[in-house]
Amino acid sequence: MTHEYLIKITKALADSTRFRILQAIAAAEETSCGALANRFPIAQATCSQHLKILAEAGLIAMRREGQFHYYHLVRDTLEAYHHALAAAFAGVKPVA
């Protein structure tokens, strides 16, 4: 994983609403934008924007069924991010 991609994922997860949306997707295994918008106090258009950022970071993938879009967590990306983040801080001395 490149440094730029690591930063892109970190930025996607830095927003608390996006982070909670990703948690909800992971817990549900698959869910729609409408279901997420109903669960969080945000408009469906705002939810769609958050989903776009998560998808661009490779954290979620979309499946289309008719007019509906269903999203699921891409666990491989999350695992690669975890390992890359750990490697980025390996050997770094803590600031006293």
Image (cartoon, helix red, strand yellow):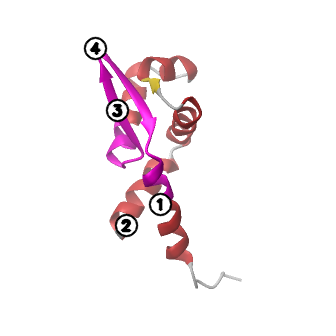
Q: Amino acid at mark 1?
A: Tyr
Q: From the image, tell me which residue sits under label 3.
A: 62
Left or right: where 73 falls relative to 63: right
Tell me the element at label 4: loop
Residue 31 pos. (x, y %) = 47, 25
Q: From the image, tell me which residue sits under label 4.
A: 66
Closer to the chain start, of discs 2 and 4, is 2
Closer to the chain start, of discs 2 and 3, is 2
Closer to the chain start, of discs 2 and 1, is 2
Viewer-nearest residue: 23 or 13: 23
Label 1 environment density (alpha carbons within 10 Å; few <14, some 14–19, many ≥20): some
Tell me the element at label 1: helix
Residue 74 pos. (x, y %) = 43, 45
Q: From the image, tell me which residue sits under label 2.
A: 1
Tell me the CA gap for discs 2 and 4.
34 Å
Marks 3 and 1: in contact by CB < 8 Å?
no
Q: Amino acid at mark 3?
A: Met
Where does the magenta region start and end? Answer: 52-80
Label 4 environment density (alpha carbons within 10 Å; few <14, some 14–19, many ≥20): few
Q: From the image, tell me which residue sits under label 1.
A: 81
